[in-house]
Image (spheres, helix red, strand yellow):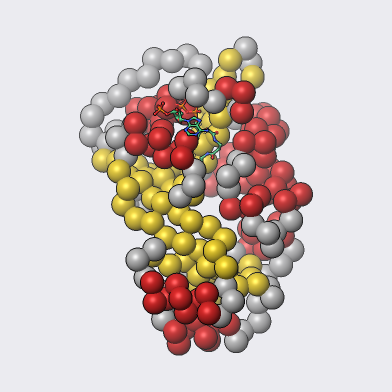
Amino acid sequence: MLKRDDFLSDIYLIDWMKHEGKLDTESIDKDLKSNFNRIDFEVPSTEFKTIKYLLDRGCYISSSKVTYAYKNTIPTVTADPRLDLATMGDAQELSRLAAETFTLDRYRNDPYLDAKLVPKLYSEWIKNSLNGRSDKVIVHRENAAILGFTNTIKKTEELYIDLVGVRKNCEGRGIGKSLISKVKELYPQETLSCTTQIHNVPMQRVLQRAGFGIVSSSYIFTAVR
Ligand SMILES: CC(C)(COP(=O)(O)OP(=O)(O)OC[C@H]1O[C@@H](n2cnc3c(N)ncnc32)[C@H](O)[C@@H]1OP(=O)(O)O)[C@@H](O)C(=O)NCCC(=O)NCCS
């Protein structure tokens, strides 16, 4: 079954569809016969037959995902005054930071997507996050400037860490690590999860150091027309 992603469709001005439900040869063929500009099929990385089937039908890999999780049962206290919650007034600065920071993401690196739309994408993403899509947007400030941020989303079974971004010239100073510690402090007793790209080594280092373990990996195969 195909579901339109309204957020991405509006940014890229196309019909951006996502396959939902059972993924077999029959449902893939049915989707490919429908009207679309773009379809994403998410496939667990162990499903070699499905992967071959999609490749044979001209799909390409547009994203490689690895999901980490952490059962948060050990109380954490991060008495770092540089960490606090963002407000609507931070929207512009956060949008700029996100657009500059996410260099390994699927949107900037997809040859079929216009990289010039990345700032618009993150600006809308940040606005939505501050407008209620996120439970919290946490920022690291120094001298009134935001050097890093993360946002959290409450899901049925878990607390999802959505974006984590640190200003380029401030990477490797432990800001990513302390943002994750703050999430742990704010959500005791919850299962925390975070998905990143398989090639995003720095993010995976941060998650591994924070005690997260890999729970799954998948690829997104995309058909474009
Ligand atoms: C991922 C990110 C948030 C980490 O933030 P950070 O403040 O640099 O993180 P920390 O300083 O706490 O830790 C960085 C870890 O990554 C490692 N690291 C930093 N840059 C790296 C690089 N280019 N390649 C490999 N490892 C790197 C550091 O050595 C450290 O690991 P260690 O604790 O084992 O030494 C930051 O690099 C970033 O904003 N990246 C771009 C945005 C992004 O891709 N976000 C994740 C997807 S949502």
Specify whether 95 is left or right of 157: right
Residue at 41%, 40% in the rendered image: 204
Going by the picture, which residue comes out furthest to the left? 73
- Left or right, 184 with respect to 143, comes to left
> Does the rendering let one see residue 195?
yes
Image quadrant holding the C terminus, namely bottom right
Q: Is residue 43 left or right of residue 215?
A: right
Looking at the picture, how far across and down is residue 112, in whole percent? 69, 62
At x 39%, y 50%, the residue is 67
- Of residues 134 and 45, the one nearer the viewer is 45
Camera-side residue of 53 and 86: 53
Any part of residue 153 in sight: no
Q: Residue at x 36, y 46 (%)?
A: 68
In the rendered image, the vertical position of residue 15 relative to residue 107, given as above or below: below
Going 65% across and 72% down the picture, which residue do you hit?
224
- Whole-percent x, y for residue 54 in the image: 50, 76
**Residue 120 at x, y = what percent?**
72, 47
